[in-house]
Image (cartoon, coloured by chain):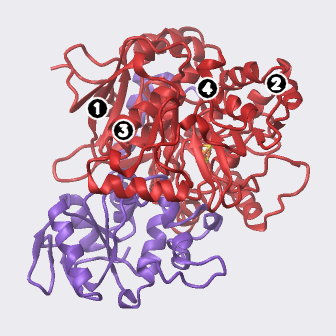
Chain colours: A red, B purple
Amino acid sequence: MGKTLYEKIWEKHLVVDKPGAVTVIYVDRHLVHEVTSPQAFEGLRLNGQKVRRPDKTVATMDHSIPTQNRHLPIADPIAAEQVETLKRNCRENDIKLFDLSNPAQGIIHVIAPEQGYIMPGMVVVCGDSHTATHGAFGALAFGIGTSEVEHVFATQTLQQYRSKTMRVHFDGDLPETSTAKDMTLAVIGKIGTAGGNGHVIEYTGDAVKRLSMEGRMTLCNMAIESGARAGMVAPDETTFAYLKGRVNMPTGDQWEQAVASWKRLVSDFDATYDENIVITTKDVVPQVTWGTSPGQVTGIDQNVPSPDDFENAGDKESCRKALSYMGLEGGTPMSEIVIDHVFIGSCTNSRIEDLRAAAQLADGKKVSDSVTAIVVPGSGIIKEQAEKEGLDQIFIKAGFQWREPGCSMCLAMNDDVLRPGDRCASTSNRNFEGRQGKGSRTHLLSPEMATAAAIEGKLVDVRNWL
Amino acid sequence: MEPLTVHEGIAALLDRTNVDTDQIIPKQFLKKVSRTGYGIHLFHDWRFLENGSDNPDFELNNPAFKGASILVAGDNFGCGSSREHAPWSILDYGFRVVVSTSFADIFYSNCFKNGILPVVVSAPDLAKLMSEIRENEGVPFKVDLAEQQLTTPAGTVITFVVDDFRRECLLSGLDDIAWTLQHESAIGDFEQKQQDTDPWLWSV
Ligand code: SF4
């Protein structure tokens, strides 16, 4: 019987595979950031160990750093300590670090592919759940806990259990006015936030094949929000074209050899998956979340649901709680929800393509007086590129703030924090209670939808705009 | 890691579904560089009022649950981020066992790394346990890992399953890095072989 892409990568990375014990797999790339690594380095130190393969490890600081006034020292003493600790740990262990002074610094999941650290067929891990992003390259990429970070430091391997496989097939073409963000939200809306538990998702179908690498990264990024361990897309010419010539990519004969091998990284035609989900792609309209979990999502042309719209008692209760937290009434048209903040950024939607799409809509328009809108590019390289194209000027003229790269208001660990009751249209990936600041309310959507919302001061159907 | 064999303790009820890691430990408490001291922040936003005093409406502030070491919660517990601060705060607060119908993957595996036992039970069993706690707040449950059994004073006996390897590790308190390092030569062999078959992975 044929094998799935996941199974092919899994089997190529087995280090210890004995009955009755956990499987040990090899890790080809370990990404590190300041929040989930200090305790792991500390554990290593206490055991008198060093990082086994610094050459397979790369680090940056992104979560707790400020996105403005970078010339000043970090005001928050605890964040400053985290940043200093990461610097020291990387120095002591010879790990390549993209620190704040590096022009390529940015969100770990944005800079790792940008710098050519991610290749098809790799096992990629990071102490961060959105590591799933790198599945876009046909890599097996997933988030791990800090104890596992320490385990990878010490052994360059991970104890893992084989996942089940799920195929999410997009049948047909995506409407021109919808995006990868809408595709990924639609999947979560369909299978729920626990629907993917225990599985690795492979996204297939023409609509996926047609996505750029940026779009595929957006798609895979949110695999974790459906509970899946990872999401992946088989590598193809789009993938190879993105990778070719990047720093850290092989060149010459070795490149040819690599591509030949990567071309075999596809699920066999007779491979079977444990679960099969089909999404009718033409029905994927622009999506927006209305609740406090990414699964509480609907089309912009729909109404906010009421508890009565749900069958199951648990869902009714979740809906009731979410509406009360979100300050919404069931039955309200989604396009009548007034917002006061817009955040364009995060490892889901802060790439150059996202910024271009947003800038195109913002060009010549004005952010509503009642809205504070910020744009946070995913990396220094993206920021530089955007500035070269004049996108920063379009944003600034329209009244958006143009910031330095980092996670920023995606999780509000720095000073980009909302106040209680603030309502934000956000291109990030989580709308949990308090995610963007205690008592704040988040609506997840695409960069296009976020931009339109900034200008109108409320959620709007971007299709009327395009 | 502290071994866990037979554990008996007060069961606290948190009847909420999809409890995510942002609720378990909000991000403002992730800035520390240590593994301990997170218990005081567990469920912070639910647990405390604006002025810092205990929120009397929050389930775990119920005096009957004081000193509880078994947490019984709704479906899909621990979803969201990979932050191990979540199990650290649960452990530091005093819980050794969490019972639910399902757990998010990363959270589930993080529990074992920290000596916490996540127990998966069926929906009807969970409902039964929840009602026993409601009827008798402060009731102690007993969890026997070797037997994979949870028992209550009312005579309910629930069997659960934990993967053999994880069970052995938790029963003995075995450190997983030490376990893997017993296979160090296999790691070296793998690296050698991969350099021959996939040299581009070694070009950076
Ligand atoms: S941008 Fe948000 S989701 Fe992505 S790594 Fe940063 S905090 Fe996590």
Q: Is residue A22 above or below residue B27?
A: above
Quarter of image, ligand 1: top right
Q: Is residue A94 above or below residue A358?
A: below
Q: Mark 1: give few (<14), some (14-19) or many (20+) Cα within 10 Å.
A: many
Residue A103: which quarter of the image?
top right
Q: Which residue is mark 3?
A: B189
Q: Is residue A249 above or below residue A151?
A: above
Inspect the image, locate mark 4, and give the three-letter code of the amino acid beneath it: Gly
Mark number displayed over residue A365: 2
Q: Chain of mark 1?
A: A
Residue A429: which quarter of the image?
top right
Q: Which residue is mark 1?
A: A166
Mark number displayed over residue A116: 4
Q: CA distance from mark 4 to mark 3?
A: 26 Å
Dot 4: element: loop
Front tag of 1 and 2: 2
The x, y position of residue A223, in whole percent, is 43, 37
